[in-house]
Amino acid sequence: MNFHSKPVQRVDYILSQCKGKKVLHLGCTNWPYTDQTLNDSSLLHLKIAECSEELYGIDADIEGLDILTSRGYRNLYRGDLEKLAECELTGTFDVVVAGEMIEHLNNPGLFLEGVKRYLSTNSRLIITTINAYSAMRFLMYGLRGRGGQLEPVHPDHVAYYSFSTIKLMLERHGLDLVDFLFYDIGIEHRPYNRNILNFANDVAVKLSPQLSDGLIVVSSNSEASSSGEREIVEKAV
């Protein structure tokens, strides 16, 4: 496992891993912001489409899928990320991108079990999520008052993750941690933050990179590797 302490830009990293690859993008619509992010060219699915060799998408929101379809995107499937075994899409992919979605799931274990159907021996699953120890969010939370009731949290988030917790969860579901990185505040988000928050973040991250905004986890399917090894042995015999 490679542990990278220097923070990267989340979108740039994802695109570097998808370039020239066959990619499956989970949660591809960014609903209900599909139209908005398509119009300002910030939709991640759009960016991956520009650099990947072949792109597929799965999302539960039919409205968002309809918008992408009307804009000319293909290979789109409706599916519950906690019930991927029921999705019509089959086959494996070089890269599976699960960006900023695991913190929304009621049962991430079901997701991890289901996504393995799309991972071959050489596939990579890229998960990005909010860092449980983000300095900027600690500061925001401390300044908001009201006895802790006003959290700087998305209304649909049900969990926070750290290096240790997400590593253990992957291991419990037969996935090996290949690379671990921190990502800093996206350059697309900085203009909308208060200057004091950006400044506090930059100082904290310079002192301790592990206080960055989010996490990037790259994993492989250890069960697929074991299966491949068994097949080689059986053929040799």
Image: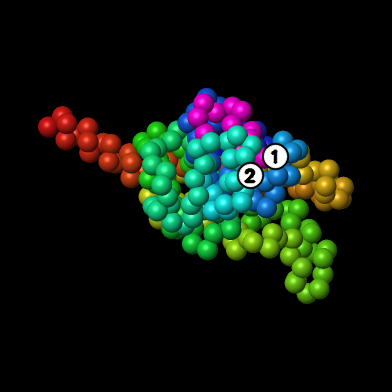
Which residue is depicted at the point 77% across and 68% down? 150
Q: Which mark is residue 67?
A: 2
Q: Which mark is residue 73?
A: none
Q: Secondary structure at mark 1?
A: helix
Residue placed furthest toward the left: 237
What span is in magenta? 42-55
Residue 73 quadrant: top right
**Residue 42, image x and y in percent?**
71, 38
Which residue is depicted at the point 57% across and 52% down? 62
Q: Amino acid at mark 1?
A: Leu
Give the colouring mode of the picture. Answer: rainbow
Residue 8 quadrant: top right
Which sits in the foreground, 153 or 161? Answer: 153
Which sits in the foreground, 6 or 30? Answer: 30
Q: Does the magenta run of residues contain 14?
A: no
Relative placement, left or right, of 79 versus 131 is left
Q: Are the residues flagged by discs 1 and 2 in contact, CB closer than 8 Å?
A: yes
Say above or below: 76 vs 111. above
- Residue 129 in view of the camera: no
Q: Secondary structure at mark 2?
A: helix
The number of numbered badges drawn on the structure is 2
Q: Does the magenta run of residues contain 44?
A: yes
In three-dimensional space, the C-alpha distance between marks 1 and 2, rounded to whole angstroms, equals 9 Å
Q: Which residue is mark 1?
A: 38
Relative placement, left or right, of 2 versus 171 is right
For label 1, count other residues whose C-alpha is less than 10 Å away and answer few (under 14), some (14-19) or many (20+).
Answer: some
Q: Amino acid at mark 2?
A: Ile
**Residue 41, image x and y in percent?**
72, 36
Relative placement, left or right, of 192 versus 115 is right
Which sits in the foreground, 98 or 143? Answer: 98
Say above or below: 142 vs 19. below
**Residue 215, image x and y in percent?**
61, 47
